[in-house]
Image (tube, helix red, strand yellow):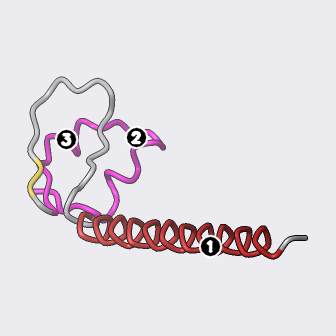
Amino acid sequence: MKFSRFTADRDNQRNEIYFMRIAVGGLVLALLANAGAALTVAGSERTILVPPDIHTSFWVSGQRVSTNLYKYIPNRPDMTMVKSHFFEYS
């Protein structure tokens, strides 16, 4: 093997390793930014599960929900989370 080809291959490998380090560093930064955004949003948004067919009005505010919704929900197993201790009914 010629010395010049050996040094060229070695330099090429060093450049590839340098690029891989930059790429991994960028991915780590993106992952940290994504995790930070997810932790910021966590808890600030609430999903209210309701039956697919509602024919009455109701309100939801923080941890409270109107009794209209509680009375309207039939005794269905898929709606037990709405009727659990997550809300105060008033």
Q: Label 1: which residue?
A: 17
Q: Is residue 12 left or right of residue 9?
A: left
- Image height of 31 relative to 72, above or below: below
Q: Of helix, strand and loop, which one carries label 2?
A: loop
71 magenta-colored: yes
Q: Which residues are magenta?
A: 63-90
Residue ID for mark 2: 75
Instruction: Determine which residue is flagged by label 3.
Output: 69
Q: Which mark is residue 60?
A: none
Quarter of the rendering containing residue 75? top left
| Residue 67 at x, y percent in the picture | 14, 47
SS label for mark 3: helix
- Numbered disc in front, either 2 or 3: 3
Q: How packed is label 3: few (under 14 Cα within 10 Å), some, or many (20 or more)?
A: many
- Numbered label tally: 3
Question: From mark 2 to mark 1, how far is it between C-alphas?
Answer: 62 Å
Q: Position of residue 25 (x, y in %)?
A: 46, 74
Picture quadrant of residue 16: bottom right
Q: In front here: 79 or 27? A: 27
**Badge 1 or badge 3: first in the primary sequence:** 1
Which of label 1 and label 3 is nearer to you? 1
Tell which of 46 and 63 is nearer to you: 46
Three-letter residue code for mark 2: Asn
Tags 2 and 1 touching, CB below 8 Å: no
Q: Is residue 22 magenta?
A: no
